[in-house]
Amino acid sequence: MAHEFETGFFYREPAWHGLGNVLAERPKTWAEAREAGGFTWDPKLVPSFGYSGIHIPTGRQVYEPGPDVVGDFTQSTAFQRCVRSDTGLELSHPRESWTLIDHTEMGEIVEAFLGLANVEYETGGVLEEGRAVWVLIKLNEPIALPGDNSLTLPYFLIRNRHDGQGSCSVSHTAVRVVCANTWKLSEMRDEANGTVFSFRHNDKWRDRLEEAKEAIKGVRKEFTTYQEIAQRLLGMTVTPRQQQMFVNEFIPNPTGATSDRQLENLAVARGQIRDILASPTTAPVAHTAYGLVQAASEWDEHVRRSKTPETRFARSVVKTNESRQRAIRIAELVTAG
């Protein structure tokens, strides 16, 4: 199984998986970000070929060369291949109509945001052997929530996929600085409301650059929505009994027959969330629904078991994760009871 994480850079603070380059200074240009993140290579579109021949002894049609086969290679008119320019590794096999947004062009999108006030590079790198590249940029406009000792900052996540499984997209997330929990705001709204801005892989993607610059205004507005949600949750007081109800519901009992190992894992996971609620980063808000959600988020991103550190990184930073929305729903339910 290919590692999710391949290369990357992180400004000042290393990622918990311990991989990548930790930078003392932020990249100033897209070229510096590409060098630090390990994506100086580009995806390239090349022809896709097939083979058609006849197995002479049997007269059977075959599609690969071999003994007693007469045939030739033919170029596909319907499909092409996307490969890495440095290694030649095949990243995808898209249709002929699919158009690349390569790393140079991705830089035009990133720098459309960096040209705005208070925006700077934070992290960036390569996932899935090059099938996905990401950059995280920070909007340096922190907020403080009443009762919470930490600051919260908005970030923009630019993702570019080369495997035909997604567009080049810009979404946003809020990071609670003390424990680095992320709330993906794109899970709180949908694309129709502008929280995810997509550049589809076609030859008209540049037409949306100016529109993307305007989208940041909607992001700032959406961050206000985050504040409203957080303040509402901070206003919901929970009792120790409700806190335990939340933990039990967020880590539910397994269905069907259970082994001693499953029961042990269940008890460990619930204990881990209780420990987070009692920790210095969460204790000031642990008596609120907001604290419950923050504890669930920290467990999901930093404590929950993963097959590899790379998959944990991809789960919490790069891939969408419904657990935060689920934690909000459970927290609201237990406080209402």
Image (cartoon, grey):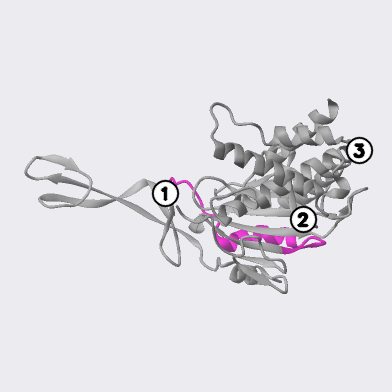
Instruction: Determine the CA span between mark 1 and mark 3.
Output: 51 Å
Up-down relation of residue 308 to residue 33 (above or below): above
What amino acid is found at the position of numbered circle 2 in the picture?
Cys
Foreground: 279 or 104? 279
Residue 223 at least partly seen: yes
User: Which label belongs to residue 179?
Assistant: 2
Q: Quick one: SS at disc 1? A: loop
> What residue do we see at 13% from left, 49% from top?
69
Q: Quick one: SS at disc 2? A: loop
What amino acid is found at the position of numbered circle 1 in the picture?
His
Up-down relation of residue 226 to residue 117 (above or below): above
Residue 321 at least partly seen: no
The location of residue 18, given as percent across then percent down, is 62, 64
Instruction: Determine the CA span between mark 1 and mark 2.
Output: 40 Å
**Quarter of the figure that contains the C terminus:** top right
86 relative position to 36: left or right: left
The span shown in magenta is 93-121
Mark 3 sits on what residue? 235
Specify which label sits upstream in the sequence, 1 or 2. 1
Mark 1 sits on what residue? 93
Return the residue found at the far front: 260
> What residue do we see at 45% from left, 67% from top?
86
Foreground: 62 or 149? 149
Sort mark 1 into few (<14), some (14-19) or many (20+) by Cα contacts within 10 Å.
Answer: some
The location of residue 233, given as percent across then percent down, is 85, 38
